[in-house]
Image (spheres, rainbow, N blue to C red):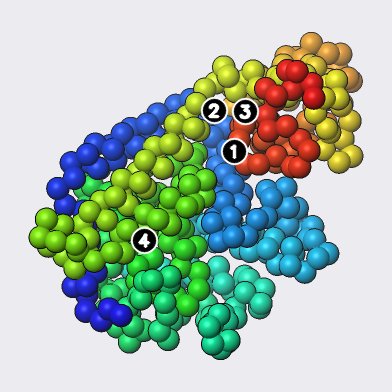
């Protein structure tokens, strides 16, 4: 058990110039993503990625709630089975807290996101939205029940695998040191992203809450990337990368927990090599996700995937969403027009289809009803939408397909 703040040192990895280079590469490539689509299109994509963040963050916790079920829950369509319904509520809670967090950071640039107040607010907002069953922790060894109080630091000793976090009596001191050491305003340039990586581990190491530490750490990391800012963040998901390498993620966390091995392993209490290894892993995951979404957002290729989706919907090779009919091929021209221009008057979308007015209006209405096009008013301009039933085809491998469906449109070139 750790009781003095020196036991959390080093706060940042030392003598690792490659981390600075890697962080700079992430920042530069992430910024480039924002140039590959119209800003209106990218904003709608951010809404989709909140759902994806929730899915993968849940998956890291061992809770598998498919994005289809998350969307159903956002529309107040909950499963009748209590356990599945509770997991849907967990997903909606994550999305709700992420939206609130982003709004708060946009409105107040002075917030120290590493401060205890901000971190406790994330915990409070998340846990107050959860079913009561999620607020009870049972010690697997003793069977003793403990109640999670939303927004409050833990009041008992815990053990996480082989790691014994600081005692509850000393948490306030560790949280104060965390707040000063990882205040984003105290770091500069690419070093801010290295600090975000190190802070992710150290927050997990402190383990300030009885439950929900991983969840808060991932939300905190998203806040850090927004605060830096890493331009283009929100168009890629760190949680997706961590979930897809979950075993490596947990192994890297464990290595960073290790004590200093010898005189060549830094001057702190914990291993400098272990922290460096974790930061390198974290930044490589970021870069992998930036490149993944960057490739998918190439305009010409995205347009082709959208048109191919319409083609396969038109001949029944892709199942229609519930209650929907096959799409006409002309829908591809309409969606392409909107993708290229961002927001388009309805009359001009109809003109792009080449259809007679009544037929075109019916098709436009179908695209809006399915969420493939979005509008703020019944007669207003339309912009592209990314409904969950189409997103898996537009963005291959963004999340798993439903059982018995191909993973991407490319697999439909040779019908199964």
Q: Which residue appears at 21% of the width and 79% of the height?
A: 4
Between the C-alphas of marks 2 and 1, the distance is: 10 Å
Return the residue nearer the eye: 241 or 228. Answer: 241
Return the residue nearer the eye: 147 or 119. Answer: 147
Q: Which residue, given by chain and number where applicable, does mark 1 sit on? A: 398
Between the C-alphas of marks 3 and 4, the distance is: 48 Å
> In the image, residue 23 lies at what x, y percent?
29, 40
User: Which of the two discs, 3 and 4, labels the residue nearer the N terminus?
Assistant: 4
Q: Which residue, given by chain and number where applicable, does mark 3 sit on? A: 343
Q: Which residue appears at 66% of the width and 78% of the height?
A: 132
Q: Which residue, given by chain and number where applicable, does mark 4 sit on? A: 254
In this rendering, position of residue 336 left or right of residue 106: right
Residue count near mark 4 (Cα–Cα under 10 Å), binned few <14, some 14–19, many ≥20: some
* Residue 10 seen in the current view: no
Residue count near mark 1 (Cα–Cα under 10 Å), binned few <14, some 14–19, many ≥20: many
Is 154 located above or below residue 413 in the figure?
below
Residue count near mark 3 (Cα–Cα under 10 Å), binned few <14, some 14–19, many ≥20: many
Label at residue 296:
2
> In the image, residue 236 lies at what x, y percent?
49, 40
Label at residue 105:
none
- Name the element at disc 1: loop
In this rendering, position of residue 357 left or right of residue 16: right
């Amino acid at each position: 058990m750790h009781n003095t703040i020196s036991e959390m040192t080093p706060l940042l990895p030392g003598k690792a110039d490659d981390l600075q280079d890697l962080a700079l590469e992430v920042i530069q490539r992430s910024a480039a993503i924002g140039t590959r689509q119209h800003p209106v299109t990218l904003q709608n994509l951010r809404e989709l990625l909140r759902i994806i963040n929730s899915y993968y963050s849940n998956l890291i916790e061992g809770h598998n709630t498919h994005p289809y079920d998350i969307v159903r829950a956002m529309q107040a369509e909950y499963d009748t089975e209590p356990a599945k319904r509770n997991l849907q509520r967990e997903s909606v809670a994550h999305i709700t807290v992420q939206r609130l967090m982003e709004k708060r950071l946009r409105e107040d640039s002075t917030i120290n996101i590493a401060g205890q107040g901000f971190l406790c607010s994330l915990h409070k907002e998340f846990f107050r939205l959860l079913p009561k069953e999620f607020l009870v922790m049972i010690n697997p060894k003793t069977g003793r029940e403990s109640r999670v109080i939303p927004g409050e630091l833990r009041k008992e000793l815990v053990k996480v695998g082989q790691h014994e976090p600081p005692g509850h009596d000393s948490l306030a001191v560790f949280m104060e040191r965390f707040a000063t050491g990882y205040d984003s305003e105290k770091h500069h340039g690419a070093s801010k992203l290295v600090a975000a990586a190190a802070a992710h581990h150290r927050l997990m190491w402190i383990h300030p809450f009885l439950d929900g530490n991983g969840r808060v750490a991932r939300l905190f990391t998203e806040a850090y990337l927004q605060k830096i800012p890493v331009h283009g963040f929100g168009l890629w998901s760190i949680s997706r990368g961590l979930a897809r390498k979950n075993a490596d993620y947990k192994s890297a966390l464990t290595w960073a927990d290790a004590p200093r091995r010898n005189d060549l392993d830094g001057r702190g209490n914990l291993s400098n090599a272990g922290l460096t290894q974790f930061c390198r892993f974290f930044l490589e995951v970021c870069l992998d996700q930036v490149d993944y979404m960057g490739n998918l957002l190439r305009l010409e290729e995205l347009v082709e995937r959208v048109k191919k989706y319409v083609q396969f919907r038109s001949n029944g090779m892709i199942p229609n969403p519930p209650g929907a009919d096959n799409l006409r091929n002309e829908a591809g021209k309409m969606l392409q027009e909107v993708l290229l221009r961002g927001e388009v008057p309805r009359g001009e979308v109809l003109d792009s289809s080449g259809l007679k007015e009544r037929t075109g209006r019916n098709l436009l209405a179908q695209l809006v009803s399915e969420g493939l096009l979005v509008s703020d008013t019944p007669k207003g301009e339309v912009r592209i939408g990314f409904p969950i039933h189409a997103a898996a085809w537009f963005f291959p491998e963004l999340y798993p397909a439903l059982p018995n469906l191909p993973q991407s449109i490319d697999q439909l070139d040779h019908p199964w």
